[in-house]
Image (spheres, rainbow, N blue to C red):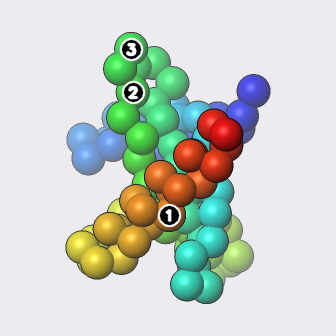
């Protein structure tokens, strides 16, 4: 089983996610997560950053071009795992 991470949604509610993959792209690191208690889970792709204390922080990708590149890279990784 993959690692379970608890994040806060936009309303401040705790939501558990399963970390299904991490990968690098253009010297940045990204994480792919899916909600644990969702019958039809959507994959969330977030950028991995570190705060001033060295703690891992998952950040929403706001730049459309960066997000498109991350989605394409993740899809390639998924295809490779299925082969």
Q: Give above or below for 10 relative to 76.
A: above
Q: Nearer the viewer, residue 66 or 9?
A: 66
* Residue lying at the far right of the rendered structure: 1
Mark 3 and mark 2 in contact? Answer it, CB < 8 Å: yes
Question: Which SS class for mark 3?
Answer: loop
Q: Give above or below for 26 relative to 39.
A: below
Q: Nearer the viewer, residue 48 or 27?
A: 27
Q: Which mark is residue 39?
A: 3
Q: Which mark is residue 41?
A: 2
- The residue that appears at 53% across and 56% down in the rendered structure is 76
Give the alpha-carbon distance from disc 1 to disc 3, as whole Å: 25 Å
Q: Is residue 50 left or right of residue 15?
A: right
Question: Which SS class for mark 2?
Answer: loop
- In percent of width and height, residue 59 lies at 43, 65
Crowding at dot 3, Cα within 10 Å, few <14 / some 14-19 / many 20+, comes out as few
* Residue lying at the far top of the rendered structure: 39
Q: Earlier in the sequence, mark 1 or mark 3?
A: 3
Circle 1 or circle 3, nearest the eye: 1
Task: Give the quarter of the figure containing the C terminus.
Answer: top right
- The residue that appears at 70% across and 76% down in the rendered structure is 54
Circle 2 or circle 1, nearest the eye: 1
């Amino acid at each position: 089983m993959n690692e379970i991470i608890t994040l806060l949604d936009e309303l401040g509610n705790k939501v558990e996610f399963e970390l299904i993959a991490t990968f690098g792209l253009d010297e940045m690191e990204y994480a792919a997560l899916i909600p644990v208690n969702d019958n039809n889970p959507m994959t969330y792709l977030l950028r991995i950053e570190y705060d001033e204390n060295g703690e891992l922080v998952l950040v929403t990708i706001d730049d459309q071009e960066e997000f498109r590149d991350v989605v394409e890279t993740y899809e390639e990784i998924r295809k490779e795992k299925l082969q």
